Amino acid sequence: MFKVENLSKNYKLDNKDEVVGLKNINLEIKEGEILGIIGTSGSGKTTLLRCLRGVEKFDEGVITVDDVVLHADDSQYYYNQLKKATAIHLQRDFGLWPASCRENVLRKMYGAKYGDEASTLLKEAEKEFGKKADEILKLVGLEGKDDFPAPLLSGGEKQRLIMARQLAKEPKLLLLDEPATMACPKTKQEILDAVKKINKELGITVIVVSHLPEVQKYLADRIVLMNDGEIVEISDDVNGITDEFLSKRAPESDITIKASDETIIKAEDIDKRYFVLNDGVSLDIENANFEVKKGDILTLLGPSGAGKSVLLHILDGIEDADGGKVTYKLKTDNEGVLWVDIHKPSLHRMDVRRKVGFMYQEFALQYYATIRDQLAARLGYKNNEIVENAKKIAKEEGLSDEILDSLYLLTDLNEDEAKHRLEQIGVMPEILNDLFPSFPATKVKEEVKDIFDLLDLSIDVLDRRSYELSGGQKVRAMLSLVLCSKPDILILDEPFGDLDPITLRDVSNSLKLLCKEYGITIVMVSHNTEFMKELSNRGIFMDEGNLVEDSRDMDQLVDKFIDFCHADYLRQDN
């Protein structure tokens, strides 16, 4: 029996306010089914899953998993019993031993029985669990990878090995939190097929949290729709519920963005090689050539490991190429039009980077700082007067143009990475604040009002912190940070990969409006096929480091990509 009765959970904020996490949840899960849970970010899906796992204390209610019955006020012992009866697979969890696939599974089996994976006696584990380990690896599609080192697996293989380790515990209930949401369609298909096989062949009951309708349609027997911590509806009409969920999505913007004939970025003869000595795994980008036109919304698409992010980071100057060059068009008052090498430090490169906005996968709001303070810092880095003043300070202090520009490049990295790089060369992080002080806080409102209006973001958000914002407000606030300096070019490395489709549609519509209003050019990496179709006017399909096809027919290019990935979950006739 799997049952949730009158489950409620509130969170207390630092200011003593309470936020509802779950409100009077009642749910029965049928043995052997795959139950889907869908809802927007912040609807309570993950909180419910964590309560079912036994890692989240709740305020009221009862959870029953087989013969484990947990009440809200029970001791930690009973929460631990629920942990033993369940297993969870988290989207971003790559907690694996740096050993073979088989050893990873054997250690989990040994730990589940004797309490400590680290002290596993491998010979004893082999005798006791070897046959079962082989069966599990075969079940998740890793047969033949028994002795393969876990760190060298592809992203999809790592996800399936994590799933194998969860199965090694022989759970009564398998909990999946956004399985493979950030993965490419090929990887995602492999993971979803593994889930189906586990459910069918082992009869394990599965609860899958995902805000992706196509995932729920492919996996779920029944589905739960959640909103604001409550269950809105439970039904075996998966198509009907997902359609109801998507009905809250704004209409797609009818704005059409067209590129001009003006070239503003050139990538010429780019070479880059990665080589892993232990296993001979390599990624080679050879002789890559393409141009970016003003007004392009260009998506680099392809399977995981194709080289998309590597090429994007070469394009933005964060990563060096082994050969070739990337140049940006710069119009100056005194020297006319220049082509600036993004990999060579110079004052001209500073001028280029000042007009480029960057968002990476880990791009996030600071937890405690107000949105105003974060915007002030960003405007300080990108404001022309502040940058020009930094050049004067550097000259007075005897810093070369190359050193100043190399320091300026760090302002586009996340704070931890920038500090790490400075520490490596023995420089205090405060130097960035000295050279590029924050924009006056009192002037931030005036500077960003038009951006906030276009993003449909209330100006009241300025003096709030990230934890005081809704999911949609957080995304818009993040966009305001990268757009506040009115960049000419945006470089986006999958920063929206884990957004629900309702919020993602808002992002797509906002970016179209901003591109039209300010003439912004975008180069991005994305795995979301619908998002790239909606937003992009051009795509470059990559595989194994090669630029396979460059096209402005996004519908045709995306369909080719789906076929290439054998992504059946995206081809359903629902």
Image (cartoon, rainbow, N blue to C red):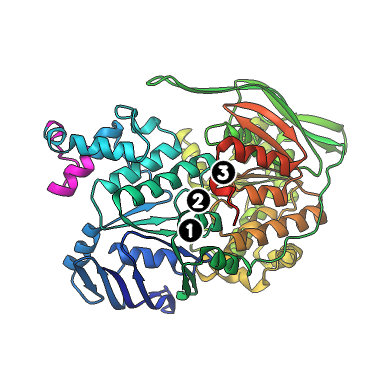
Tell me residue 410's x, y (percent).
58, 41
* Disc nearest the viewer among 3 and 1: 1
Determine whether, in the image, residue 556 is placed left or right of residue 229: right
**Which element is circle 1 on?**
loop
Tell me residue 372's x, y (percent).
62, 65
Q: Residues within 10 Å of mark 1 (few under 14, many from 20)?
A: many
The amino acid on which the numbered mark 1 sits, given as a three-letter code, is Ser
Q: Are marks 1 and 2 in contact (CB under 8 Å)?
A: yes
The amino acid on which the numbered mark 2 sits, given as a three-letter code, is Thr
Is 117 in the magenta? yes
Q: Residues within 10 Å of mark 3 (few under 14, many from 20)?
A: some
What is the magenta range? 106-123
**Comes first in the chain, label 3 or label 2:** 2
The answer to which of 428 and 368 lies nearer the viewer is: 368
- Where is residue 65, by image quadrant? bottom left
The amino acid on which the numbered mark 3 sits, given as a three-letter code, is Leu
Q: Which residue has dot 3 on it?
A: 413
Label ID, residue 181: 2
